[in-house]
């Protein structure tokens, strides 16, 4: 097939996306596909609109890639692509909205509240409201950002104002939520609509206090245990909740769902990643490897799962 890979982008996760794109491109070429590589920028949309390919593989992360915008452009051009559509992408990227959907459907979430930080003159008032509603420790982060960029775990109320300012640099909305201490795990999900399956649960043991940007992307920043050493009932619950979250948002082909297992051994859902890191050493490929699916075969399986969209086009 003729496949375009969009990677790079302009978000704070550009470097990760460059690595993801390189891995995807190599895997597709290894499988015999004709690949067009596009280092995407919103300033060069003609690179996308002029594409003459059978399928687009989105290897972007963060804004303009994971939030539904590039998906909308591809939809308008009639170009089929791998992964979730506009609505699912936008919902997953909007942490406040997705948490509402999860909570309304019985999934366990941390208590949270969203605040509009567009008007800097209101930050002091917002800081006051946060202190009234939450007890330390709590988390302040951008509502729409990935890779824990702009996130602060507030352990002292005096640091709340600085945390608001940090998060506001990345987004016009911030999310404040109770800090849930526990074991960090993630569950990859893949499959056709209504037939999704969860891959093995991965436990993440970061070298820092929590799974921050450096833990995710620096060599030796974290340890991945696949499969996670958990009781069978907890594993089953995590996999069931992951598939449920994927379906509730209307995700397609694949996603990765992040959880914390709290001190009561209850999974607390954090977020759904519709375009998780896909470097050869990323979490999703780690889980695939555990069930005998090589990196190249995993990438090919995403293409195969996207065939209905391609067939509809032709």
Image (spheres, rainbow, N blue to C red):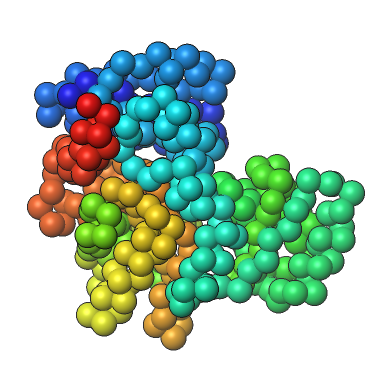
Q: Is residue 280 above or below residue 139?
A: above
Q: Residue at x 65, y 59 (%)?
A: 175
Residue at horizontal 42 percent and vertical 29 percent from the top: 74
Q: In the rendered image, which quarter is residue 57 located in? A: top left
Camera-side residue: 304 or 234?
A: 304
Q: Residue 206 in the image: state x and y as whole percent.
A: 41, 59
Left or right of 277 on screen, residue 94: right
Residue 252 vs residue 61, the one in the foreground: 252
Compared to residue 300, the image places residue 232 above or below, namely below
Q: Is residue 306 left or right of residue 136?
A: left
On the rendered image, what quadrant is the C terminus found in?
A: top left
Residue 17 % position (x, y): 41, 33
- What residue is shown at x 25% (from left), y 24% (from top)? 54
- The quadrant of the image that shows the N terminus is top left
Above-or-below relation of 104 to 42: below
What count of labels does the image hold?
Answer: 0
Residue 83 in sight from this viewpoint = yes
Which quadrant holds residue 40? Answer: top left
Does residue 66 lie above or below 154 as drawn? above
252 left or right of 266 in image: left
Percent x, y for residue 43? Answer: 56, 18
**What is the residue that sits farthest to the bottom in this orientation?**
264
**Residue 140 in view:** no
Q: Position of residue 152 (x, y in %)?
A: 63, 57
Q: Residue furthest right?
A: 121
Please tell me which residue is depicted at 22% across the width and 59% down the height of the picture: 195
Is 69 positioned to the left or the right of 33 in the image? right
């Amino acid at each position: 097939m003729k496949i375009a890979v969009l990677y790079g982008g302009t978000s704070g996760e550009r470097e990760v996306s460059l690595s993801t794109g390189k891995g995807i491109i190599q895997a597709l070429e290894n499988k015999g596909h004709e690949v067009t590589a596009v280092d995407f920028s919103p300033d060069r949309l003609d690179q996308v609109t002029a594409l003459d390919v059978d399928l687009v593989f989105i290897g972007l992360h963060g804004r303009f890639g994971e939030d539904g915008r590039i998906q909308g452009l591809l939809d308008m051009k009639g170009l089929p692509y791998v992964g979730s559509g506009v609505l699912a992408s936008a919902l997953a990227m909007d942490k406040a909205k997705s948490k509402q959907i999860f909570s309304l459907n019985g999934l366990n979430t941390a208590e949270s509240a969203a605040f509009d930080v567009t008007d800097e003159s209101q930050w002091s008032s917002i800081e006051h409201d946060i202190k009234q509603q939450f007890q330390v420790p709590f988390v302040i982060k951008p509502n729409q950002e990935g890779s824990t960029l702009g996130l602060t775990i507030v352990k002292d109320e005096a640091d709340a104002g600085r945390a608001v300012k940090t998060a506001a640099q990345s987004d016009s909305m911030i999310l404040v939520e109770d800090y849930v201490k526990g074991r960090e795990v993630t569950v990859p999900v893949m499959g056709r609509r209504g037939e999704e399956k969860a891959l093995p649960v991965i436990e993440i043991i970061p070298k820092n206090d929590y799974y921050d940007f450096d833990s995710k992307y620096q060599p030796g920043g974290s340890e991945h245990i696949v499969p996670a050493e958990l009781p069978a009932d907890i594993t089953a619950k995590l996999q069931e909740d992951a598939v449920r979250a994927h379906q509730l948002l209307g995700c397609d082909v694949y996603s990765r769902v992040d959880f914390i297992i709290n001190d009561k051994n209850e999974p607390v859902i954090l977020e759904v990643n519709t375009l998780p890191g896909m470097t050869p050493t990323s979490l999703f490929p780690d889980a695939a490897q555990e069930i005998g699916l090589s990196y190249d075969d995993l990438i090919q399986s995403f293409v195969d799962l996207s065939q209905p969209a391609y067939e509809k086009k032709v």
